[in-house]
Image: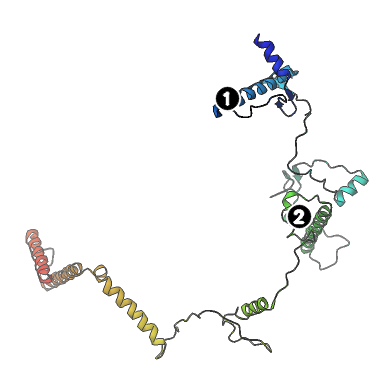
């Protein structure tokens, strides 16, 4: 009994397989649902029925077997859905496309690899280290039309430069033509106001007297001397400068302002030494190093004064250690 009921409800649905869409035109929600949970449950139930109706129609279509499963060709959609943006206008053909269409020239796919006659190997047609590169030719054969004393390599570079300039000029012409029709590409349409292809730049703003004075003041003070040694035009007023000028101490030392730099540096050094003297100088370490150097100097003098060589001297390590320890202790006692 349930199967005929389901088939009957599915017949009420309008299914558009082209858009994979289904809806029930006869369904209506109650004006005041009892609770939100009941409304959500009813929406889920009706959505499940609609999806089931789409699946049943899809499995009734003729299919072809594939590794991933059966494939179905969808029919053309029957429901017209609204479009967010307008249809793009067709781009007008370029000058070369019109010429090729008139002469019956068809584009053919070029090979990616070409034979290089210089090296006798196959290389890429375009890009880095491509085949038959004119810049890598060491010798150019002279022609009857060549003028004597003319550099063929310089002429070839000049021709290449002119060719690139002509290509860029033609590209701008094509973009201008497309801008008139409104068929510019989207990435160019965004910057159409700033490109020199549309001729629709913003109108020049009228500059008032104050702005002209500000610009003239900036230009006058844009030199190394701040416009101090520049020649003034007849009727030119001194530039307005709001705020204080920065003052720098002179580099050369002298009796007047030059002595200020010395005093300022001395003041900074005194402040640093007075605040951080305990970090800069370790008094105990300095006393220890002084005592060690003094003891080494004394031992060197004793070794030079003795007539016997150092190898024949009796080596009493214990006495030496004790003497050194005594000397260190004496030195520390004196320092303390």
The residue lying at 68 percent from left, 26 percent from top is 28
Which quarter of the rendered picture does the N terminus lie within?
Answer: top right
Mark 1 or mark 2: which is in front? 1
State left or right for residue 276 relative to residue 121.
left
Label 1: how many residues lie within 10 Å, few (<14), some (14-19) or many (20+)?
A: few
- Is 126 displayed left or right of 40 in the figure? right
Q: Position of residue 123 (x, y in %)?
A: 72, 44
Q: Quadrant of residue 271?
A: bottom left
In the structure shown, which secondary structural element does the residue marked by tag 1 occupy? helix
Badge 1 is on which residue? 41
Q: Earlier in the sequence, mark 1 or mark 2?
A: 1
> Would you say the residues marked 1 and 2 are in contact, meaning their CB atoms lie under 8 Å apart?
no
Residue 171 drawn at (x, y percent): 80, 55
Q: Is residue 69 above or below residue 105?
A: above
Disc 2 is placed on an element classified as: helix
Real-space Cα distance between discs 1 and 2? 75 Å
Would you say 60 lies left or right of 173 here? left
- In the rendered image, residue 184, in percent from the top left (x then y), is placed at 78, 51
* Residue bearing the label numbered 2: 134
Q: Quadrant of the C terminus?
A: bottom left
Mark identifier at residue 54: none
Viewer-nearest residue: 10 or 195: 10
Q: Residue at x 13, y 63 (%)?
A: 311
Q: Nearer the viewer, residue 100 or 138?
A: 100
Whether residue 68 appears in this view of the structure is no
Furthest residue in direction bottom, as rendered: 255
- Residue in front for this viewpoint, 297 or 71: 71
State whether residue 186 is above or below residue 242: above
Vertical placement of residue 327 versus 63, above or below: below
For disc 2, the neighbor class at 10 Å (few under 14, some 14 to 19, many from 20) is few
How many marks overall? 2
């Amino acid at each position: 009994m349930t199967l005929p009921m389901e088939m009957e409800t599915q017949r009420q649905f309008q299914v558009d397989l082209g858009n994979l869409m289904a809806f029930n035109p006869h369904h209506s929600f109650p004006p005041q649902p009892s609770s939100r949970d009941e409304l959500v449950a009813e929406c889920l139930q009706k959505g499940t029925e609609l999806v089931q109706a789409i699946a049943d129609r899809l499995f009734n279509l003729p299919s072809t077997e594939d590794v991933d499963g059966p494939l179905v060709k969808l029919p053309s959609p029957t429901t017209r859905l609204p479009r967010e943006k307008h249809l793009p206008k067709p781009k007008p053909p370029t000058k070369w496309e019109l010429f090729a269409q008139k002469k019956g020239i068809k584009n053919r796919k070029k090979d990616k690899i070409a034979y290089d006659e210089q090296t006798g190997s196959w290389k890429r047609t375009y890009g880095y280290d491509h085949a038959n590169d004119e810049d890598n030719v060491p010798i150019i054969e002279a022609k009857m039309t060549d003028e004597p004393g003319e550099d063929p390599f310089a002429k070839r570079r000049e021709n290449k430069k002119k060719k690139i300039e002509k290509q860029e000029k033609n590209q701008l012409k094509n973009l201008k033509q497309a801008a008139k029709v409104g068929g510019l590409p989207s990435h160019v349409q965004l910057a159409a106001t700033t490109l020199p292809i549309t001729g629709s730049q913003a109108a020049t703003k009228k500059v008032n007297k104050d702005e002209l004075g500000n610009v003239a003041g900036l230009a006058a003070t844009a030199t190394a001397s701040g416009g101090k040694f520049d020649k003034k035009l007849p009727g030119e007023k001194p530039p307005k400068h709001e705020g204080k000028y920065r003052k720098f101490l002179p580099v050369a030392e002298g009796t007047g302002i030059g002595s200020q730099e010395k005093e300022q540096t001395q003041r900074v050094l005194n402040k640093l030494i007075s605040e951080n003297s305990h970090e800069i100088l370790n008094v105990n370490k300095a006393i220890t190093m002084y005592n060690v150097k003094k003891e080494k100097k004394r031992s060197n003098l004793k070794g030079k004064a003795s007539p016997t060589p150092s190898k024949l001297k009796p080596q009493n390590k214990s006495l030496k250690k004790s003497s050194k320890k005594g000397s260190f202790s004496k030195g520390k006692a004196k320092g303390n």
